[in-house]
């Protein structure tokens, strides 16, 4: 087992770490060091030098994002901690909050100090209410200990955090749409301004994923070189949380060196395939990433290695399929979810996603021809012209299906319908319905609500 940094205080009985538990392992030492001996610029430089990249899917360098907040920017400034986690197959952030809430709190406060913010908003999806209540309780514990609120640890720095429960919808994971949701507006993305200039209420706002912020305390406490030695690949950064679900023996969430090979995650940490199952493909980073070919099992799961292979790391949430799964039906199910979750702001997303689903339904029903497959490819390519990243992400499984499993699509055309029907072994693909929380393994369910 590799060194556990984020899951250092993870317990078999799933009890969240208390403030005493967290401090016993060095908790809040980084915050003490920062507010008493470091300038905000020095904190940003350490995070930038570490190479930490955002864990929400985009992989943007964290320290660089923090540096975008201008020194003369107005106040109040905000930190927006994203725990929306509506990507199907993704549940790492919920487990992290439920495991060690003060690790997350310290990370948010350190980000606040680095950019001299005044307030933090912890944005959490509605089905995570147990975790929202846990965090509210521990925020009060932190305030009573002088770790949050006015003059933190006797310094001149004051910062507090509120918990905002989302009303739901996948689009709220996009940073500007999330800001609109917090302000009580319709959660449409806004690409006309940068969040670090004009975010919440038109003021500077830094948005980071909860796993990203939870990685910061250990970097400041142990140093840049230590953090860089944790990775398994030259382009990896620190440790990474990988969620694994689907046809595997031991689904769950695992902290592994960043850049661990995809095959080692599936056949090592997750225990390999279920008895009688045979690996066919997986979605390596949630449903907005591409199906992979078997050869990609050798690919390190870090941002640069995956990009070099023509793939996306996404959230690092691996969904595994076996040989008896119809990938056409799986893709239909994914697109049904994305079509429902679109904010409807732009034409490619609003019209294109349902159209891709319609073409695939024709293929599945044996009513399509080769021209329909060509049309599906053109529509998927057109998703790149959408207003935000929602539609291109929704098209990724379609791209993977047509690139790596085109023969399976052609079998549907030649046989005038799904070749998996009637064999007694076919699986409908993914889950019965993405409307329900069926994306979370039993282990994750025992530790809180999913994401």
Image: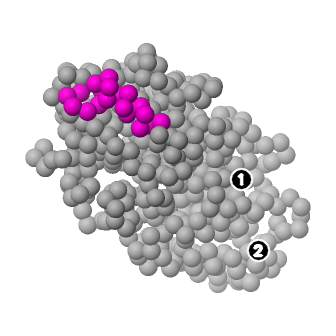
* Disc on res. 321: 1
The answer to whether 122 appears left or right of 368 in the picture is left
Image location (x, y in percent) of residue 67: 22, 43
Residue ID at (63%, 60%): 434
In the rendered image, residue 262 lying in the magenta stretch gets the answer no
Q: Quadrant of the N terminus?
A: top right
Pick whichever, 266 or 358, lies toward us. Answer: 358
Residue ID at (39%, 22%): 27
Q: Residues within 10 Å of mark 2 (few under 14, many from 20)?
A: many
Residue that extends furthest to the left in the rendered view of this protein = 72
Residue 297 shows up from this direction: no
Name the image quarter holding residue 39. Answer: top left
Image location (x, y in percent) of residue 54: 39, 44
Indicate the secondary structure of the residue bearing disc 1.
Answer: strand
Nearest-to-viewer mark from 2 and 1: 1
The mark nearer the N terminus, 2 or 1, is: 1
Q: Residues within 10 Å of mark 1 (few under 14, many from 20)?
A: many
Indicate the secondary structure of the residue bearing disc 2.
Answer: helix
The Cα atoms of the two marked residues, 2 and 1, are separated by 19 Å
Secondary structure predominantly adopted by residues drawn in magenta: helix
The answer to whether 255 appears left or right of 48 in the picture is right
In the rendered image, residue 140 lying in the magenta stretch gets the answer yes
Image location (x, y in percent) of residue 319: 64, 50
Residue ID at (89%, 61%): 424
In the picture of the structure, the residue carrying the numbered disc 2 is 412
The stretch of residues the image draws in magenta is 134-152
Compared to residue 381, the image places residue 58 above or below, namely above
Pick whichever, 437 or 72, lies toward us. Answer: 437
Residue ID at (74%, 75%): 364
């Amino acid at each position: 087992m590799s060194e556990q940094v984020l899951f250092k205080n993870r317990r078999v009985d799933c009890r969240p770490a208390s403030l005493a538990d967290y401090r016993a392992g060095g908790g809040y030492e980084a915050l003490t060091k920062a507010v008493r001996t470091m300038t905000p610029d020095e904190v940003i430089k350490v995070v930038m030098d570490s190479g930490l990249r955002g864990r929400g899917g985009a992989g943007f360098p964290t320290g660089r994002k923090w540096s975008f907040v201008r020194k003369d920017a107005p106040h109040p400034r905000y930190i927006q901690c994203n725990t929306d986690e509506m990507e199907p197959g993704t549940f790492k952030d919920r487990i992290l909050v439920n495991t060690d809430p003060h690790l997350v709190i310290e990370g948010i406060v350190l980000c606040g100090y680095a950019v001299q913010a005044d307030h933090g908003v912890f944005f959490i999806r509605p089905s995570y209410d147990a975790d929202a209540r846990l965090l509210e309780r521990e925020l009060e514990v932190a305030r009573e200990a002088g770790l949050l609120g006015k003059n933190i640890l006797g310094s001149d720095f004051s910062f507090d955090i509120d918990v905002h429960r989302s009303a739901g919808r996948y689009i709220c994971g996009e940073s500007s749409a999330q800001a609109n949701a917090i302000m009580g507006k319709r959660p449409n993305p806004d690409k006309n301004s940068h969040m670090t200039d004009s975010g919440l209420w038109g003021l500077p706002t830094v948005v980071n994923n909860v796993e990203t912020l939870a990685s910061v305390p250990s970097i400041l406490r142990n140093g840049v070189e230590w953090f860089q030695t944790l990775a398994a690949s030259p382009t990896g950064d620190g440790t990474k949380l990988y969620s694994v679900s689907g046809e595997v023996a031991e689904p769950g969430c695992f902290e592994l060196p960043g850049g661990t090979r995809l095959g080692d995650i599936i056949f090592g940490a997750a225990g390999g395939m279920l008895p009688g199952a045979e690996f066919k493909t997986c979605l390596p980073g949630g449903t907005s990433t591409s199906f992979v070919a078997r050869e990609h099992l050798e690919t390190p799961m870090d941002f640069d290695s995956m990009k070099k292979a023509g793939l996306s790391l996404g959230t690092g949430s691996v969904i595994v399929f076996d040989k008896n799964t119809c990938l056409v039906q799986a893709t239909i199910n994914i697109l049904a979810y994305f079509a429902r979750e679109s904010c409807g702001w732009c034409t490619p997303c609003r019209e294109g996603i349902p159209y891709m689903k319609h073409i695939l339904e024709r293929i599945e029903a044996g009513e399509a021809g080769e021209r329909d497959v060509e049309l599906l490819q053109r529509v998927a390519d057109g998703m790149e012209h959408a207003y935000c990243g929602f539609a291109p992400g929704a098209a990724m499984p379609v791209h993977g299906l047509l690139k790596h499993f085109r023969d399976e699509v052609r079998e549907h055309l030649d046989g005038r319908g799904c070749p998996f029907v009637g064999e007694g072994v076919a699986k409908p693909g993914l889950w019965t319905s993405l409307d329900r929380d069926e994306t979370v393994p039993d282990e994750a369910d025992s530790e809180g609500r999913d994401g």
